[in-house]
Amino acid sequence: MEAKPNICLTSTNCCVCGRNNPKTIGIGRDFEYHTSPQEFVAMRCHSCSHIYLNPRPLASEFGKIYPPSYHAFDFSEKNYGLVYRVRSRLEASRFIKRCRNLPDDANILDVGCGDGFHLDLFRKYGKKSWKVEGIDIDKRAVDAARSLGFNVHLGSVEEIELPDNSYDLVFMIQTIEHVEKPNNVLRAIFRLLKKNGRLVIITDNTGSVDFTLFKKSYWGGYHFPRHLNLFNKRSLSMLGENAGFQVESIKTIVSPVNWVYSIHNLLVSWGAPQWLINRFTLKSTVSLTLFTVLDFFLQKFRLGALLQATFRKPQ
């Protein structure tokens, strides 16, 4: 494998409380895409418990840390087979539940829509009268989503000129952890939502059992160096309230992905044979199934691997 150069990093403060008094909680490498040989540091804020990458990649390095093979650019049935079909059904069930009380003419926005995977779920399983559109900062992802016929805006939600008070529902699905300044993103979404409109966020849970076991280096949720901000229930609630939202609910939901990638990262670090490493990826139906069962059990104790937060814009 050709050696990759180090990427340029910059220091930052906690995005939740704005303070700069963190403690190192984890150190690891890009075990998945090998975009850089350097180590990255996850810090925990003493004040609010938020976890963030510090230092983190400069925005100018995003093209390097998200290579063409990145899964979100083409998560398709052709590439992922049974995993794609099962995930589609499960996530469609979850998200349509969040839409039960939406009007027939609802406007729905997916911030960080990637290749349009979730937009396609709304098209297939939602009301035909709903208007769905997306936003993404990566042109490759936007081109992929547009090729499916979706209205997708290229850029950040803070910068794109969309009408205020015009959306009934905004989703951020496995997106907020990739964002440099999630506090600014939530304020922009608050402006776009109608009164009583909702924002639904799904993100990795640093209050999970998998985090506790693998946090020193191998936790799949670190996704070094692409996940810049990582939350527990407390820090995510604070972020929403700081942006003006009312916290309607924050709960955990089931996902096997961080379990699978934590094992994957451990095996890569140990120099395990590739055939074994390949048993722990997004294409590994056996390991994904086993850890779904495990996380389903943990979910009974509200310790699922992901957080699902629903924030509401006040009347």
Image (tube, helix red, strand yellow):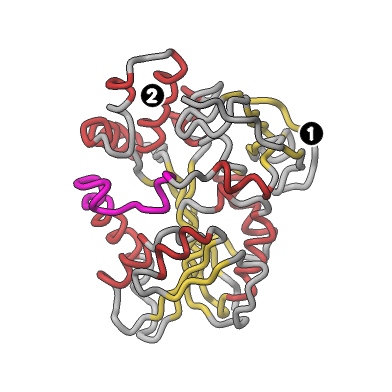
Could you tell whether 302 is left or right of 27 in the image?
left
How many angstroms separate mark 2 from mark 1 (CA)? 31 Å
Position of residue 153 measured from the top left corner of the image (x, y, whole percent): 53, 71
Asked which secondary structure carries label 1, the reply is loop
Q: How many marks?
A: 2
User: What is the quadrant of the C terminus in the image?
Assistant: bottom right
Position of residue 187 measured from the top left corner of the image (x, y, whole percent): 67, 65
Residue type, mark 1 in image: Asn
Principal SS element in the magenta part?
A: helix
Tell which of 47 and 187 is nearer to you: 187
104 shown above or below 33: below
Position of residue 305 measured from the top left corner of the image (x, y, whole percent): 41, 39
User: Magenta span covers which residues?
Assistant: 69-87
Position of residue 52 measured from the top left corner of the image (x, y, whole percent): 65, 38
- Bin the neighbour count of mark 2 within 10 Å (Cα to Cα): few under 14, some 14-19, many 20 and up: many
Which residue shows up at 63% across the image and 30% down it?
5
Q: Is residue 119 visible?
A: yes
Q: Most extreme residue toward the right, as rendered?
A: 20
Q: Quadrant of residue 226?
A: top right
* Among the two numbered marks 2 and 1 on one chain, the one whose residue lies closer to the N terminus: 1
161 shown above or below 210: below
Residue that numbered label 1 is attached to: 21
Could you tell whether 17 is left or right of 99 in the image?
right
